[in-house]
Image (cartoon, helix red, strand yellow):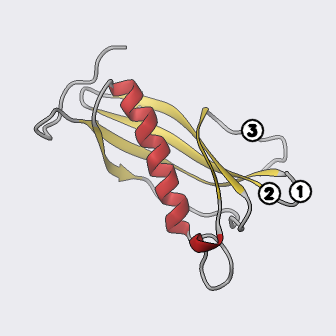
Amino acid sequence: MPETEAPRGQLTVRISAMPADTNANGDIFGGWVLSRMDQAGGIAAIERAHGRVVTIALDAMKFIRPVKVGDTLEVYTHVESIGRTSMKIHVEAWARRFSTRHHEKVTDANFTFVAIDDNGRPRPIPAA
């Protein structure tokens, strides 16, 4: 990955990685990162859909680098495409390193969300 790469999309979630979120090696659990990514994607999807959404899929993820205790996890989102009731949101997780303040990409994925009504049924996504 080139050092000139910058996050794609809008900063949606920012959180500190804490000791309670680590595995036995002292790295932050991948599931913790994935959960923050789903949360950020959901926020972006709710804003675009003007209401409730559910996550229905995500494409393959590959962790590029670990997240360490003290790092700030920054999650960026970008609406990739919108269908009648579903949308794809590109989500990138970046770590701002605690000790160096260096900013580097950790992972990314495309999440698919479906807009739902109060009864949990798919509903059309508004034009804008």
Identify which amino acid the numbered label 2 is placed on.
Arg
Q: What element carries label 1?
A: loop
Residue 112: x %, y % from top left: 36, 43
Quarter of the picture containing the C terminus is top left
For the residues labelled 2 and 1, the Cα–Cα distance comes to 6 Å
Q: Which mark is residue 97?
A: 2
Answer with mark 1 or mark 3, whichever residue precedes in sequence: 3
Picture residue at 47% right of the left edge, 57% below the top: 35
Residue 101 picture location, percent across and down: 85, 51
Q: Can you tell which of label 1 and label 3 is closer to the viewer?
A: 1
Whether residue 18 is visible, yes or no, is yes
Mark number for residue 100?
1
Q: Which of marks 2 and 3 is nearer the N terminus?
A: 3
Vertical placement of 94 versus 66: above or below?
A: above
Q: Mark 3 points at which residue?
A: 6
Residue 58 coordinates in the image, percent (x, y): 40, 52
